Image (tube, rainbow, N blue to C red):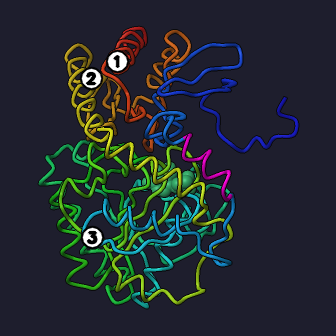
Amino acid sequence: MTQHLSNVWFQLTDLPVVEGFGCIVRTSDGQEYLDFTSGIAVTSTGHCHPKVVAAIQEQATKFIHSQVNCYRNPIVEQLANRLYDVTPDGIDQFFFCNSGAEATEAAVKLARQATKRPNVVVMDAAFHGRTMLTMAMTTSKTSYRAGFQPLPSGIFPTPFPNAFAWGCDETEASRRALKQLRHLLKSQTAPDETAAIVMEPVLGEGGYIAAPNAYIEGVREICDETGILFVADEVQSGFGRTGKLFAMEHCGVRPDILMMAKGIASGFPIAGIGARADIMEKWPQGSHGGTYGANPIGCAAALATIDVLVNDGVVANAAERGIQLTAALQSLQVHDKGLADVRGPGLMVATEFMDANGEPDAVRVAAIISRCRDEHNVLFMNCGTYGNIMRWMPPLIVSDAEISRAVEAFAEAMESSR
Ligand SMILES: Cc1ncc(COP(=O)(O)O)c(C=O)c1O
């Protein structure tokens, strides 16, 4: 069957899915699975939300490819205006592309042009994509870069404040990480050579860890002191995933550049960056672009998705279901010391497993994920450098009952893996 298909993609499952609706995916033999992967945190409004489907269908009858350099379809500006309304203050102008990696590339290209500085600081355990530049910025696992080196230079990783791993509280983690960042700017990349600090406000692939507010505020302070641009990668944390439309809203810090993808259009491949107008204006016309960026069907899907998220109470649902989920998972910790940490925010929830020696327990996580799939028809995915973290990223429309069903499956699988 796969004779003509590349084998390069890693496979979480080989389920032959043919349909998806809400939180459910259905296979060709009629089996239904509760999908807590959301296609890796993408299907924010669920699979095939009727309003998103209708918007895509309608747009497909009007224009499939109104190439953005050749002419200007008003739907592109409509999406920019809508994003201006819903993104954090200070994000004024938008550029559209097709994937999270392309959004990262665009953010770095913009930062370099705007500052005329070459280097970029990234966090340890970051994930920003798999193109040549973004591989160099992705520090979560060697498997993303092994065999592809050497990678582009000018990328400088700094520790992400990881209170759980460091065995300290968030205040101390922030203090240490900020000290390391200041040290990096003294020892390896001088501020006047540094265009941007790029960070996920909640680490995604690296382990679903929210940066403490104090750290994000500290990074903002350093950027203000030095003229370095603060780039928030909200590819995974954006569009309601954390219980607010953007994770940066939890701390109220303004990024200079905001990256968006995944949840923006419920699965239609569109992505983008937003930036302060005075920064965006420094991007020379014609110096960046792409054939498919700002695709009108993608714009229609994004506009419909934002309407559903904001007007149908989906972001509020993500916050409420997140509280329900974390409370249920925390109650399981009482009976099982292997479940070493449960953390939010919203529906960006991690359950981290350690073994009796205090080492990351990837074997147990793999066993739990398999059992949930095979015995309970619930799909989960792991994350983290050591693969010992299960990430909970259901569609944001998930119901109270679906959360309970997934937690029950998880509890049974946890018990059977002891
Ligand atoms: C935070 C973050 N940035 C960037 C990316 C890259 O996105 P894409 O896979 O669409 O290139 C991802 C993908 O998982 C991500 O989670």
Alpha-carbon neighbours of circle 1 within 10 Å: few (<14), some, or many (≥20)?
Answer: some
**Rendered location of residue 30, percent (x, y):** 66, 13
Which residue lies under the disc numbered 3? Answer: 181
Q: How many marks?
A: 3
Residue 145 or 129: which is nearer the viewer? 129
Alpha-carbon neighbours of circle 3 within 10 Å: few (<14), some, or many (≥20)?
Answer: many
Q: Mark 3 or mark 1, which has the lower sequence index?
A: 3
Q: Does mark 1's beta carbon lie closer than 8 Å to ligand 1?
A: no
- Circle on res. 329: 2
Alpha-carbon neighbours of circle 2 within 10 Å: few (<14), some, or many (≥20)?
Answer: many
Does the image show residue 154?
yes
User: Are circles 1 and 2 on residues that touch, CB within 8 Å?
Assistant: yes
Of tags 2 and 3, the one toward the viewer is 2
**Rendered location of residue 57, percent (x, y):** 62, 44
Point 50% across, 14% down: residue = 371
- Could you tell me how far apart the alpha carbons at marks 3 and 1 are, in whole angstroms? 38 Å
Where is 390 relative to 247, above or below? above
Point 60% across, 48% down: residue = 58
- Circle on res. 407: 1
* Magenta span of residues: 53-63
**Rendered location of residue 88, percent (x, y):** 27, 64
Q: Main secondary structure of the magenta part?
A: helix
- Could you tell me how far apart the alpha carbons at marks 2 and 3 are, in whole angstroms? 34 Å
Q: Does mark 2's beta carbon lie closer than 8 Å to ligand 1?
A: no
Report if residue 382 lies within the magenta region.
no
Q: Mark 2 or mark 3, which has the lower sequence index?
A: 3
- Could you tell me how far apart the alpha carbons at marks 1 and 2 are, in whole angstroms? 7 Å
Where is 233 relative to 1, above or below? below
Q: Quadrant of the N terminus?
A: top right
Q: Check disc 2 and give the amino acid type.
A: Leu
Point 61% across, 52% down: residue = 59
